[in-house]
Image (cartoon, grey):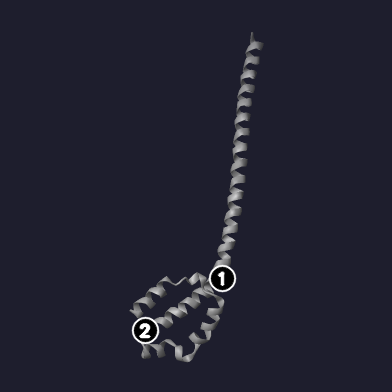
């Protein structure tokens, strides 16, 4: 039953909430010669599996130190992009309105020119 509980706890472990203090305490342990994969494989399959999991958690922690700031930068960039897109859409809508007005005025101008031409011919 203990193995099942341990496996369940490992699977459910909140790796994003791992504290730097815990990782700092694990580093000397997982880098020790007696903790090497080849040594642990010969001693115990369970110890080998747990060691691989611990090393993976530390690697994940290290990776997240790089990834999390990039995620924040991405959020900021996406928000900025969203604002810029809204500004672009607004400007484009105004341009379309002006183009529509201009076309209407040009059509009226052409109609007035034609009417003037017809009046001159009479």
Q: Residue at x 65, y 11 (%)?
A: 119
Q: Residue at x 63, y 15 (%)?
A: 115
Closer mark to the observer between disc 2 and disc 1: 2
Q: Quadrant of the N terminus?
A: bottom left
Instruction: Pick out the residue farthest to the left.
Output: 1
- Residue 82 lies, with reference to residue 106, above or below; the image says below
- Residue 47 lies, with reference to residue 92, above or below; the image says below
Q: Quadrant of the C terminus?
A: top right
- Tag 2 secondary structure: helix
Q: Which residue is mark 2?
A: 46
Answer with left or right where residue 112 lies relative to residue 41. right
In the depicted view, which residue is nearer to us: 62 or 108? 62
Residue 49 place in picture, x, y as percent: 39, 81
Q: Which mark is residue 35?
A: none
Q: Residue at x 56, y 79 (%)?
A: 21
Label 2 Cα neighbours within 10 Å, binned few <14 / some 14-19 / many ≥20: few
How many circles with numbers are drawn on the protein? 2
Q: Residue at x 36, y 88 (%)?
A: 44
Mark 2 and mark 1 in contact? Answer it, CB < 8 Å: no
Q: Quadrant of residue 102?
A: top right
- Residue 122 lies, with reference to residue 94, above or below; the image says above
Residue 63 place in picture, x, y as percent: 52, 73
N-terminal of the pair, mark 2 or mark 1, is: 2
Answer with left or right where residue 88 lies relative to residue 61. right
In the depicted view, which residue is nearer to us: 63 or 107? 63
Q: Quadrant of residue 52?
A: bottom left
Q: Which residue is mark 1?
A: 66
- Tag 1 secondary structure: helix
Answer with left or right where residue 40 lies relative to residue 108. left
Q: CA distance from mark 2 to mark 1?
A: 31 Å
Label 1 Cα neighbours within 10 Å, binned few <14 / some 14-19 / many ≥20: few
Answer with left or right where residue 5 lies relative to residue 76. left
């Amino acid at each position: 039953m203990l193995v099942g509980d341990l496996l369940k706890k490992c699977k459910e472990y909140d790796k994003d909430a791992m504290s730097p203090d815990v990782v700092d305490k694990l580093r000397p342990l997982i880098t020790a010669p007696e903790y090497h994969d080849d040594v642990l494989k010969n001693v115990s399959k369970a110890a080998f599996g747990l060691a691989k999991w611990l090393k993976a958690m530390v690697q994940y922690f290290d990776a997240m130190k790089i990834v999390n700031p990039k995620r924040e930068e991405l959020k900021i960039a996406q928000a900025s992009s969203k604002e810029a897109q809204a500004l672009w859409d607004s400007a484009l809508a105004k341009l379309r309105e002006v183009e529509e007005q201009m076309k209407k005025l040009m059509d009226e101008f052409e109609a007035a020119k034609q009417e003037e031409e017809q009046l001159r011919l009479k």
